[in-house]
Image: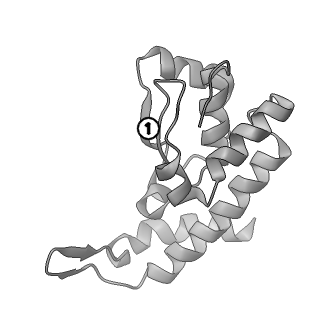
Amino acid sequence: MDIKGLNKARVLAALYNASTPLGLGFMHYDPSPMTEEQAREILNEGNFYFDYLRGRVMKIDLEHDEVNTSGYNRDNGENAAETVIESLKNDNSSNSDAIKKMHQKGVTSAAESVRERLNSKTTINGNVIHLGLEEFKGYLEPIIEKIEKK
């Protein structure tokens, strides 16, 4: 996706604000939205590729004007990055109502997924590891409960 001409700090903040925690990302999840200034500080440190950021799954590289959105979309929803960028282009806000709704919907869905895995054990089948979350239940369950109450 082409982001040429867009403020990259605003792009980072918008993508972050729409993204969700995934699995163990809830351990570092910060529900606060990112401001453009916070994003600028991160970019000024020379960081352009983001795997996870404050517990939220990103999988995006903002170094160039052409952005591969496949990793972000895989974990945040079909065409999620494109939807965020279009929203940003339309109203120039990194935390518009549309972005807030995307984030909340994603957090709710991700919390349900974690809840379902809290009693599952990690298993290894050949070269495939299925990460269970039973060993993290004591830490994750209160976080999930807090999200579910909102």
Residue 71 vertical position relative to residue 116 in the rendered view, above or below: above
| Residue 117 image point, x, y percent | 44, 80
Rendering coords of residue 10 (x, y %): 67, 26
- Picture quadrant where residue 118 is located: bottom left
Residue 138 versus residue 16: which sits nearer the camera? 16
Is residue 89 in sight in this rendering?
yes
Q: Residue at coordinates 72% horizontally, 70% vertically from top-left?
A: 149
Q: Quadrant of residue 73?
A: bottom right
State the residue position of label 1. Answer: 50
Q: Position of residue 64 (x, y in %)?
A: 48, 24
Q: Quadrant of the N terminus?
A: top right
Q: In the rendered view, would you say 43 is above or below 68?
A: above
User: On the rendered image, what quadrant is the C terminus found in?
Assistant: bottom right
Q: Front-most of 59 and 52?
A: 59
Colour convention: one colour
Q: Position of residue 132 (x, y in %)?
A: 34, 77
Amino acid carrying label 1: it is Phe
From this view, report whether residue 119 is shown above or below residue 69.
below
The residue located at (51%, 82%) in the rendering is 116
Q: Who is closer to the viewer here, 74 or 120?
A: 74
Left or right of 135? Residue 68 is: right
Total labels drawn: 1
Mark 1 falls on what kind of element? strand
Residue located 63% across and 70% down the image = 109
